[in-house]
Image (spheres, grey):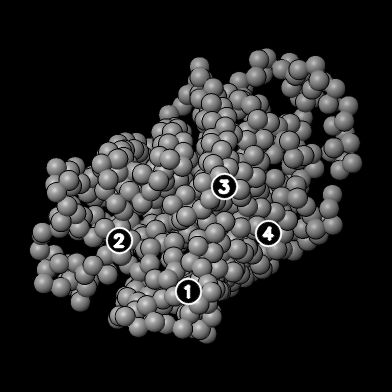
Amino acid sequence: MSVAESHLHDHHDDHEHDHHDLPWIKKYVFSEDHKVIAKQYLISGIIWAIIGGGLSLLFRLQLAYPDANFDWLKPLLGGWIQNGKLDPEFYLALVTMHGTIMVFFVLTAGLSGTFSNFLIPLQIGARDMASGFLNMLSYWFFFVSGVIMLLSLFIETGPAGGGWTVYPPLSALPQAISGSGLGMTMWLISMALFIVSTLLGGLNYITTVINLRTNGMSFLRMPLTIWAFFITAIIGLLSFPVLFSAALLLIFDRTFGTSFFLSDIYIAGQALSFEGGSPVLFQHLFWFLGHPEVYIVLLPALGITSEIVATNSRKPIFGYKAMIGSMLAIAFLSFIVWAHHMFISGMNPFLGSIFMFLTLIIAVPSAVKAFNYITTLWRGNIIFTPAMLFSIGLVSFFISGGLTGIVLGNSAADIQLHDTYFVVAHFHIVMGSASFFGMLAGVYHWFPKMFGRMMDEKLGYVHFWITFIGVYMVFFPMHYIGIAGFPRRYYSFTGFDFTQSFTDLTQIITIAAIVTFAAQFIFLFNFFFSIFKGRRATENPWRSNTLEWTTPVEPGHGNWPGAIPTVYRWAYDYSKPGAEDDFIPQNVPFSETKGSNFPHENEQMVAEAGITHGK
């Protein structure tokens, strides 16, 4: 047992007693309990998802009905509606803020912040995170970051307007457009604080997994959820500082007259004093974070899906070690494929072919995960809970969106499809929708442990089917208009003859987006109603094996009221031949399951006494 864990064991009783005596603001606002912090991240992520999704509807309306009169939006958007039309610069700001909010505030903080915080201590058998104080700080840095980003929506010149990638020179010159002014400065400050939050959280997750595992919880007995959160934290710790440096150098260019990303710039015919910099350098720095970021949001969702698919298939996860290996391979390869976003930046074609080769290789571990999900489902005794449906939906998106990634990974094809709606459709399905479905699956599955109540299953089914069909209706047609040549981020397509035949399709996409967004209010009602009025949960409603279900229905601070359970087996002993039940929790010794033990497991009984005494 580690020193840190001993400390948590020795002081648990006093710690829990102190927690009950804490004032409300310390217990629920500035809390150091990982479960409360997870709920804070979750509620924040839900709020940001509503804001980010709402912004997307505004620019979808503009794309579908470019000749319509939008004066009815004036009470909401004020001066950004001119003569009944959406201001073109504000359109770019909407796209910028939608991308930033969904990628960072919802799918990074909302997903990882919620489930890494909630599940890591519970599933590895720890009282709390390694540092409750740093954990609390990580949320409040995120909160302040979000407040600054939100306020930028209300300033006179509007929020940042350089695309969510904020490429210079547009983002580096405050005088370029209105969205390059104060809004861009606030974007950069907000992202700097967000990165600090992510790094504090990541350090905590890594330290907790390495040092605070309970007796018997070896790395190869950890659930795949923990492996996913652990690897994600490592990726974030190595890649986010690079974005921080890019943001810092961009602030220097904007404020102090440096030329890291600027050279030979003219505005209104006037030459500026910048020379020697390169905007392509910013692209390298941004995408060195940007591509690992794809897996920072995707891996936690895949880990959640692994747990839910195994539990609701009533089968052991297929290829446990292969799943771990594939995540490690994805993590490594994600750092050396960033330039496939830059095939048209003028790079040497030979270098482009290397990145193309590496990009196609990363499809291999991704395919391993997809096949392992399918083989786990194959001939399983599947229980179609809402969480299981959303997990299967994730697998569907991961496969269909991943196939288009292979197309875009080919540099010759990418040169033609770059910056078209084909790219938009690809990453919204494989990263955005898949990760969002993983987040929703996790909420449905662990809601009983978070709040001690059950969500309504019928509402969950309605929510799933409308959302699942809606996502495909939104993004599948985008592949076709992308192949036809529709460029992304354009304010209107009425000026092009070749786009006129796709007007109806664009309107169908927008209507599907509105319906899909509206369906999320079914989830919101189900979520908040169930917190207070949902059916009371039992201790282990899904008959699952992992340690969080050995805690009380609503765990207190410290998680277990007595001693922390000892672990004797892996997390996926489902439907084991000879067992009395179709699940065997991790804390059940092999000596109690002699009828279902394999020969090598009978040998484990000799070591059980040593494990129990912490040897």
Secondary structure at numbered mark 1:
loop
Q: Secondary structure at mark 4?
A: helix
Q: Alpha carbon of mark 3 to alpha carbon of mark 4: how far?
A: 37 Å
Residue carrying label 3? 351
Question: Which mark is nearer the camera, 1 or 2?
Answer: 1
Residues under numbered marks 3 and 1 in contact, where contact means CB atoms less than 8 Å apart: no
Residue 55's tag is 2
Q: Position of residue 600 (x, y in %)?
A: 81, 20
At 50% from the left and 25% from the top, the residue drawn is 374
Q: Position of residue 87 (x, y in %)?
A: 21, 70
**Which residue sits at x=80%, y=42%?**
215
Is residue 279 shown above or below 61? below
Kindly identify the amino acid type of the residue bearing the numbered disc 2: Leu
Specify the quadrant of the image occupied by residue 429.
top left
- Give the residue pinned by disc 1: 263
Q: Are marks 3 and 4 in contact (CB under 8 Å)?
A: no
Q: CA distance from mark 1 to mark 4?
A: 41 Å
